[in-house]
Image: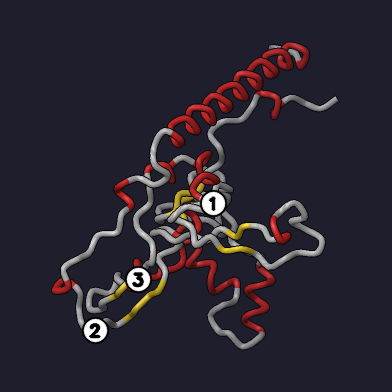
Amino acid sequence: MSSVEDLIPIGAIAEAASQVAQFLAVLLSTIVFFNHEGNDSDSRITDQPSDLILDQHDFIIVGAGSAGAVLANRLTEVDDWSVLLIEAGGDETKKSDVPLLAAYLQLTQLDWQYKAKPQNTASLTMKDQRCNWPRGKVLGGFCVLNHNMMYVRGNKMDYDSWLQQGNPGWGYDDVLDYFKKSEDNRNPYLGNTPYHSMGGYLTVSEAPYKTLLADVPQK
């Protein structure tokens, strides 16, 4: 069995190799991006024949971001309902599939290019002390421009507070079933617990790579 002293050099080498690989990935992605147009041709909005659009709909949803797209999908589970989903932007681009390039998609036609209000204690190096406020103008919404890749539901107390303020159906116990319905948790120790589920549309998992140093005991 290897000792801690034996693992540290191996872990250090693996960590260095990982950093080099990440740097090369960023470098290659940057070169590819700047050698092509900022937005792919497949993101262009195309006109649809008017005879394909109904004159009336049961539901009209404005904005095809995470919430709007999920809502439209849920409503169309009822066969007799007609749903119109409206989005100002076009399709995602191929570059939006690369998380490292998310920052490059901001301030493009996929972004509403909003600015935050002037700040007194922040954004001191920004023009007029206003930072960018990226919002997705694209099918998929802000998730297309967001590279955090974190699955966050919100605080239980917030949902229960909304219920107490007179919003039935918004308590944590009410919304938990819908969170579980949408989730496809790939972590075996979480997938079939009271708070998580498997088989939904949204895949949730831990990062596949973890440095060997993460398991080295601390002295």
Image quadrant occupied by the C terminus: top right
Image location (x, y in percent) of residue 195: 57, 59
Residue beneath the point at 82% across and 61% down: 121
Side of 31 relative to 7 (left or right): left
Q: Which residue is mark 3?
A: 86
Identify the element where label 1 is drawn.
Answer: loop
Amino acid on which the number 2 mark rests in the picture: Gln
The disc placed on residue 79 is none
Image location (x, y in percent) of residue 69: 39, 65
Looking at this view, is 9 or 121 the one in front?
121
Side of 17 relative to 218 (left or right): left
Q: Which residue is mark 1?
A: 146
Identify the element where label 3 is drawn.
Answer: strand
Residue 190 drawn above or below residue 158: above
Residue beneath the point at 40% across and 74% down: 62
| Residue closest to the far front | 127
